[in-house]
Image (cartoon, grey):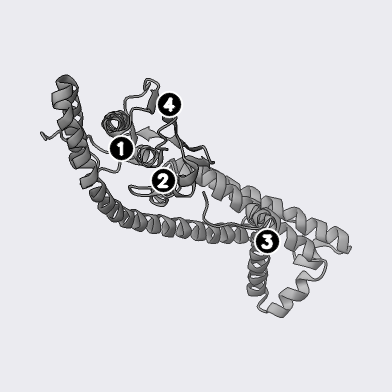
């Protein structure tokens, strides 16, 4: 699903964030250079016995920063639990500063010189610990890392909102093209017209489904989310109308389990796009059965949806080109609306084409649209 690809070495390097190591080394060198007043003094200090103390700063401050960024912030700050977050953040800073102190003692032991000779103090009492370099350096690294992280999150959120607005406009245009597709409208109306004389009851039921479908497209599909039950009802109506246009040797099956949650929402037309593609590219063989199989299952809040259809070898290369709003647009909408919450798998061969979508749903966050008369 990801657009970017990396070699195995690059993937390993990025996954374990090894590129952070040069950042921390450079950051602490700059910190020491500022403290000593000269980059040359900082370099000579690092390439000596003082490298032990330097490594204690690098390692423990990095651990403290990552504990804050990847545990405290997601668990407390992002959930507005401010008192708990500040309490644990202060404790993290104090513990991190305390963990740096053994580096001073270890440097003294290995150099054979006293703390007084090396640092001008007899011992690291609490006053020096929490007013000297261990505490101030830890606070500075925490502040810098949080500034970078929060700024990055703000920029990503802002960029995502801009992409959503742009995608909304593009999607609305594609929706309009789909909604008023003359081929779909005229063929459906024509099928219902012939049914009026052949089977009036069936024609009446089909006309009701057609009216409901148009009402849905005109009034209910413009929200970012709609009820999952409404999307499934639209799906069922569309399938029934599509059946009217198909040959007798076409078998269409829809297997949908009862919905345990009535308040779940989904972005409109996410599911229908794959069904539309199946009808568009299903095989049209006259001497054997052509088929479309649709399955929908809800496990908790996880939606498992699959669509498969028979294909003709001659149309094999054509099946991956989706109609409607297109596979790329669907994937793009999924990336923007459900980032990290879906898995899309597409399998195709000479005899069949299958799409499997696994999607994590949530409660409907938009108010229900006001019902309008068609």
Residue at 25% x, 42% y is: 223
Classify 249 as above or below 122.
above
Residue 342 locus on image (x, y percent): 47, 40
Residue 350 locus on image (x, y percent): 53, 41
Contact (CB < 8 A) between labels 3 and 2? no
- Residue 260 appears in which quarter of the rendering? top left
How far apart marks 4 and 1 lie (CA) works out to 19 Å
Question: According to the image, label 2 marks what residue?
Answer: 334
Question: According to the image, label 3 marks what residue?
Answer: 21
How far apart marks 4 and 2 lie (CA) works out to 18 Å
Residue 155 locus on image (x, y percent): 42, 60
Classify 68 as above or below 299.
below
The answer to which of 67 and 279 lies nearer the viewer is 279
Residue at 63% x, 69% y is: 31
Question: Badge 2 local density, few (<14 within 10 Å), some, or many (20+)?
Answer: some
Looking at marks 4 and 1 on the same chain, the residue that comes earlier in the sequence is marked by: 4
Classify 57 as above or below 356.
below
Contact (CB < 8 A) between labels 1 and 3? no
In this rendering, does residue 63 appear at all? Answer: yes
The answer to which of 247 and 325 lies nearer the viewer is 247
Residue at 38% x, 51% y is: 329
How far apart marks 1 and 3 lie (CA) works out to 42 Å
Q: Secondary structure at mark 1?
A: loop
Question: According to the image, label 1 marks what residue?
Answer: 365
């Amino acid at each position: 699903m990801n657009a970017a690809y990396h070699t195995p070495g690059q993937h390993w390097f990025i996954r374990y964030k090894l590129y952070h190591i040069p950042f921390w080394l450079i950051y602490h060198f700059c910190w020491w250079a500022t403290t000593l007043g000269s980059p040359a003094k900082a370099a000579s200090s690092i390439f000596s016995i003082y490298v032990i103390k330097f490594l204690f700063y690098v390692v423990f401050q990095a651990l403290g920063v990552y504990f804050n960024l990847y545990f405290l912030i997601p668990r407390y700050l992002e959930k507005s639990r401010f008192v708990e977050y500040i309490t644990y953040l202060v404790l993290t800073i104090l513990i991190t500063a305390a963990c740096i102190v053994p580096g001073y003692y270890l440097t003294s032991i290995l150099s054979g010189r006293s703390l007084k000779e090396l640092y001008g103090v007899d011992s690291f009492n609490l006053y020096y610990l929490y007013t000297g370099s261990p505490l101030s350096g830890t606070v500075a690294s925490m502040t810098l890392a949080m500034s970078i992280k929060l700024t990055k999150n703000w920029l990503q959120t802002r960029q995502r909102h801009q992409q959503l607005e742009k995608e909304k406009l593009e999607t609305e245009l594609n929706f309009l093209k789909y909604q008023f597709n003359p081929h779909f409208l005229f063929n459906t109306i024509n099928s219902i017209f012939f049914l009026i004389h052949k089977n009036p009851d069936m024609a009446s039921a089909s006309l009701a489904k057609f009216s409901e479908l148009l009402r849905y497209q005109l009034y209910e599909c413009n929200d970012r989310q709609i009820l999952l039950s409404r999307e499934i009802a639209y799906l069922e109506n569309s399938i029934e109308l599509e059946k009217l246009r198909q040959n007798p040797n076409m078998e269409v099956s829809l297997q949908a389990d009862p919905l345990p949650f009535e308040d779940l929402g989904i972005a409109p037309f996410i599911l229908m796009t794959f069904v539309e593609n199946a009808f568009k590219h299903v095989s049209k063989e006259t001497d054997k059965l052509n088929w479309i199989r649709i399955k929908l299952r809800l496990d908790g809040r996880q939606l498992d949806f699959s669509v498969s259809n028979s294909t003709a070898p001659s149309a094999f290369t054509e099946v991956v080109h989706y109609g409607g709003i297109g596979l790329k647009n669907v994937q793009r909408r999924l990336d923007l609306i459900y980032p990290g919450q879906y898995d899309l798998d597409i399998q195709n061969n000479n005899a069949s084409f299958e799409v499997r979508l696994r999607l994590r749903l949530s409660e409907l966050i938009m108010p229900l649209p006001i019902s309008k008369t068609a």
